[in-house]
Amino acid sequence: MTSLSTTVIIPVHNGERYLAAAIRSVLAQTHPPAEILVVDDGSTDRSAAFAHSFGPPVSVLTQANLGPAAARNLGVAHATGDLLAFLDADDLWLLYKLARQVQVLKRDPACEAVLGSMENFVSPELAETDRQAMAPSADVSGAHHVGTLLIRRAAFQRIGAFDERWRHGEFIAWWARADRAGLTHVVLPELVLRRRLHMDNLTRREQEGRRSYPTLLREHIRSVREGTAKRHG
């Protein structure tokens, strides 16, 4: 089978607490990536230094604090792999994530992308009261999360970059666009991503981030209607 190299892109903003664990979960893959690009999104902590300390295949890119969409796009612009994968700096991959997904893409050249299952987990260092408050969210699972995705670089370029207007929910907007563009993909039942729940994750990303979701939904509906009108016009 043709060899397919993988670039993993990890955006980080003040994520020194969990970044090393995220990187180690990528380095531990049974199918190792060709490169890991950590994109420091204007951190004021030691995130960049932590990433630099790993050495190859980890490289560090830096930018002003423009948000995760811009950070991922910067990583894509520097990627050399045939395949692209993304991981948030506080999440973890399962050992066989890349191996299982690369196998699918090798077997089916027409398949452009592969997703897998995700589960939430409460970060173990939190106080018991915080853990109990987050427990209901830990039951949430799914597949359509940027951290479960492995996509051919050519397919990503066909769909286009993440929309940098959105500092939250950018993958929702991107996936809606990919769906409209007819991205051919497979969703595996296997667990590939463990998404960490912690205080910053819930209070900043979840509650504040959800404010942009109605706007994202309206734009998606408008785009669908415009596409339907063109087809029937």
Image (cartoon, helix red, strand yellow):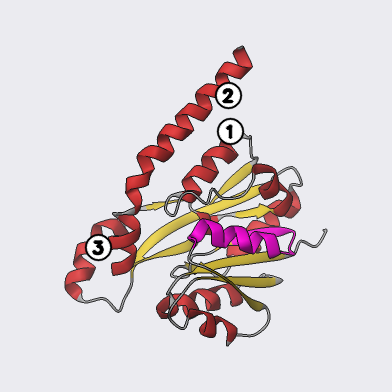
Q: How far from the left and from the top, in percent, is residue 50?
A: 52, 84
Q: Residue 71 in magenta? A: yes
Residue shown at the point (52%, 27%) measured from the top left: 224
Q: Amino acid at mark 3?
A: Met
Please state if 124 lies on the left or on the right of 64 as rendered.
Answer: left
Q: How far from the left and from the top, in percent, is residue 38?
A: 58, 72
Mark sitting earlier along the chain (1/2): 1
Q: Secondary structure at mark 3?
A: helix
Please state if 65 lies on the left or on the right of 76 as rendered.
Answer: left
Q: Nearer the viewer, residue 14 or 5?
A: 14
Front: mark 3 or 2: 2
Residue 180's tag is 1
Q: Amino acid at mark 1?
A: Arg
Residue 134's tag is 3
Q: CA distance from mark 3 to mark 2?
A: 40 Å
Magenta segment, which residues?
66-85
Mark 2 highlights which residue? Answer: 227
The residue lying furthest to the front in this view is: 64
Q: Quadrant of the C terminus?
A: top right
